[in-house]
Image: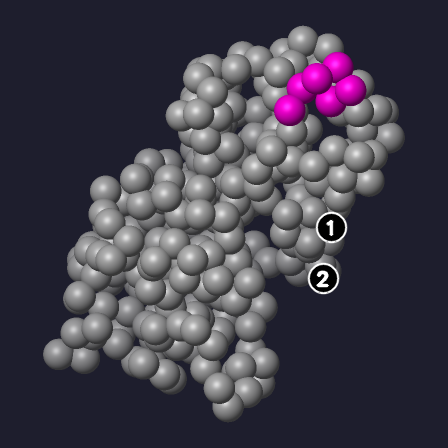
Amino acid sequence: MKNKVLKSYRAFLVDVDGVLVRGGEVIPGAIDGVAKLQKIGRVVLLTNNSTRSRDQVALTLHQAGFPIEADDIVNSAFIASQYLREHFGLVRVWPLGEEGLSRELSNCGHNLVSPSEADWVVAGMDRNLTYARLAQGLRALLAGARLLATNEDPTFPTPDGPQPGAGAVIGALRGMGFSPHAVVGKPSRIAFEIALEKAGCSSEETLMIGDRLETDILGAGEAGIDSALVLTGVTTEQMLGNRPPNVRLIARSISRLSAGEFIYH
Ligand SMILES: [Mg+2]
């Protein structure tokens, strides 16, 4: 059978930007690709984007035609919320990020408070970042709050080109002298552990499918998870050169991957 390789896995962790969608548009064949993978095993979407809640992401993907529910999604806002609960219980937190981050922290049971009352500042990508908001973060951290970062992706792809990612927000806090207690999104092991928990599978039974070498592929490798690189996002065939990186599979798209058509395996 052509996709015998895929059938050796029981779960698939799938990145979103550059794998399923690109600049708000569905990548051709991606919906069918996800459906095919779901016939083989559990599909969990693993994304560093913290700007929207899992419900909001699920709604958008569902409306676009993807057979995806909120419980199939692990984003860095959810990862941060789960990490805090598992290690520190329910905490008093001030989010420096967009609505999705606040919603996930609140859905998890954490107490959203003002900067002066916070034990934690959880920071993520924030397209409404202002000097005044940074000053609030500074005061919370000076008063003893600890910092947790959703991720440090330097940029975020849009149809008009790259925009500053969560790395710009965390960088501003680092610039004021504060380092995060942890950075929970990909490539952190924390992200993959929470995604595996959601998938209900072990690292050996799971394949990570992503477009970015330094997060999806690197992080999966460090967590002991096989990975598949697709070329519909930030990584091009030219960038790979002659030597395939440390990946199990390479395919032109998730559609080709799900059909068992690989460039490299
Ligand atoms: Mg991506």
Q: Secondary structure at mark 2?
A: loop
Give the residue furthest to the top: 117
Task: Give the labeled residue for mark 1.
Answer: 164
* Quarter of the image with the N terminus in it: bottom left
Residue 122 in view in this figure: yes
Q: Nearer the viewer, residue 36 or 221?
A: 221
What is the image's colouring?
one colour
Q: Residue at x 64, y 47 (%)?
A: 152
Give the residue furthest to the right: 131
Q: Nearer the viewer, residue 31 or 244?
A: 244
Q: Is residue 176 magenta?
A: no
Measured in 3D between alpha carbons, the distance from the residue under mark 1 to the one under mark 2, in whole angstroms, is 10 Å
In the picture, measured across the screen, residue 41 lies left or right of residue 83, that is: left
Q: Give the x, y percent position of residue 72.
A: 33, 42
Q: Give the x, y percent position of residue 199.
A: 27, 44
Label 2: few (<14), some or many (≥20) within 10 Å? few
In the picture, measured across the screen, residue 104 lies left or right of residue 128, that is: left
* Quarter of the image with the C terminus in it: bottom left
Label 1: few (<14), some or many (≥20) within 10 Å? some
Magenta residues, start to end: 141-146
Rendered position, 244 above or below 24: below
Task: Give the labeled residue for mark 2.
Answer: 161
Q: Residue at x 28, y 69 (%)?
A: 258
Q: Give the x, y percent position of residue 56.
A: 48, 35
Q: Residue at x 44, y 25 (%)?
A: 87
Q: Is residue 145 magenta?
A: yes
